[in-house]
Amino acid sequence: MKSTQWIIIVLLIANLTATLWFGINKPVMMNSDPLEQNAQHLLPKLITSEIINNLYDNLAVLVNSKDYKSLYNMLGPTARAQLNSVEFVKQMNKFFSFVNIVESGAYSHSEFLESKGSTRIYALHYLLRYSEESQIGEKGKLKIIIAVEDEKYQIYGFRFSDASG
C-alpha cells in the first residue's frame, strides 16, 4: 500500500474512535422531563423577591379597589397592543362579581415557559384567599406572565382563577 492510503486509513480509524469516545462519554441529562427542567429554571436576577411581592401587592390593591383600567395599564406594551381595554375591564368586572375581593396572597413558585428570540417568558404563581362571599370558593390562584429581555421586564398577562385552575 502507498503511504497516502495508510494515512487515510489511520485518519478514518482516528475519526471513528473519536466519534465513539465522545458519543459514549456524552453527559446524560438526569431530568429529561420538561416539567422538571422548568421547575429547576431560575428567574433572572432582575426579577427579585421585592418585584415578585410588589407585583402581587399592586394587583391586589387595584383589584380590590375595582380599578381595572389601572390594572390594564400594568400590562406591558406588547400585551396592551393585543388586548382591548374595554373588553379587559368587562372581563375583570365579570370575574370579580363572583369573587368580590382578594383578601390575601403569597408567592408560590415560578415557571420558565419559553424563549422567543432574546425574550424569556416566565410565569409567577401565587396562592390566593378570596373573601367568604366568593361564589367560587375562598381559595384561588394567580398566574402573572412576565417577559424579560436584556435588563427590562414587562407583564404579558395575568390570570385569576379558583383553586383548581
Image (cartoon, rainbow, N blue to C red):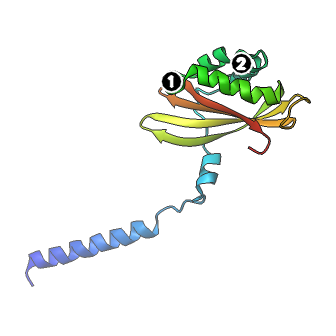
Horizontal and vertical percent position of residue 164 = 77, 45
Number of labels in the image equals 2
Compared to residue 15, the image places residue 123 above or below, namely above
Q: Which amino acid type is shown beneath numbered disc 2?
A: Asn
Measured from the top left, where is residue 56 in percent x and y? 72, 25
Q: Nearer the viewer, mark 1 or mark 2?
A: 2
Which numbered disc covers residue 58? 2
Residue identified by numbered label 1: 151
Query: Could you tell me if residue 125 is visible in this image?
Result: yes
SS for dot 2: helix
Q: Please tell me in which quadrant of the rendered image residue 103 appears.
A: top right
Q: CA distance from mark 1 to mark 2?
A: 21 Å
Residue ranking furthest to the right: 132
Q: Residue at x 28, y 71 (%)?
A: 14
Q: What's the residue type where badge 1 is placed?
A: Glu
Residue found at x 79% / y 31%: 106
The image quadrant of residue 32 is bottom right
- Secondary structure beneath dot 1 equals loop
